Amino acid sequence: NWIESHQCCKMHKLILMDIDMPGKDGFQTTEEIFEILKYQNIDTFICACSAYDGTEERVKAEEVGMQDFLSKPVSKQNLENII
């Protein structure tokens, strides 16, 4: 099935997810990634990454399971803290 064919997530421990992407936003993509990962015993940290860093975006990121939020422009210190 579709989920079993998407094994690429096994390699990624950290994903910086842009929330404003064409076609499918980062929130939808994050939900799909977690759907794939729930069938695999893999711990992946997904961090929202966006210039849109208002309360609404931060709440939505948390609702879909993103563990942190990195505002653009990204500072070296904030990126190091996430990593």
Image (cartoon, helix red, strand yellow):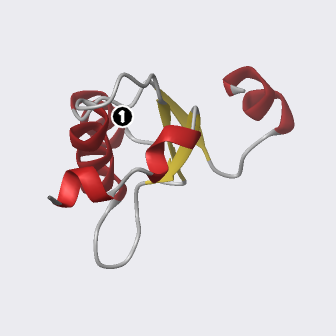
Instruction: Judge from the rendering whether residue 67 lies leftward or rightward of residue 62; answer left or right.
Output: right
The residue nearer to you, when weighing 55 against 66, is: 66
Q: Which residue is mark 1?
A: 58
Residue 19, image x, y percentages? 40, 55
Residue sitting at x 57%, y 41%:
11
Q: Is residue 31 above or below residue 82?
A: below
The residue nearer to you, when weighing 7 against 49, is: 7
Residue 57, image x, y percentages? 33, 43
Q: Which residue type carries mark 1?
A: Arg
Q: Residue furthest right?
A: 76
Q: Is residue 72 above or below residue 2?
A: above
The image quadrant where one finds the N terminus is: bottom left
Residue 77, image x, y percentages? 83, 28
Q: Residue furthest bottom?
A: 23
Could you classify mark 1 by the number of other residues whose Cα lies within 10 Å: few (under 14), some (14-19), or many (20 or more)?
some
Residue sitting at x 24%, y 35%:
64
Q: Is residue 23 above or below residue 55?
A: below
Instruction: Judge from the rendering whether residue 78 lies leftward or rightward of residue 51; answer left or right.
Output: right
The image quadrant where one finds the C terminus is: top right
Residue 4, image x, y percentages? 25, 51
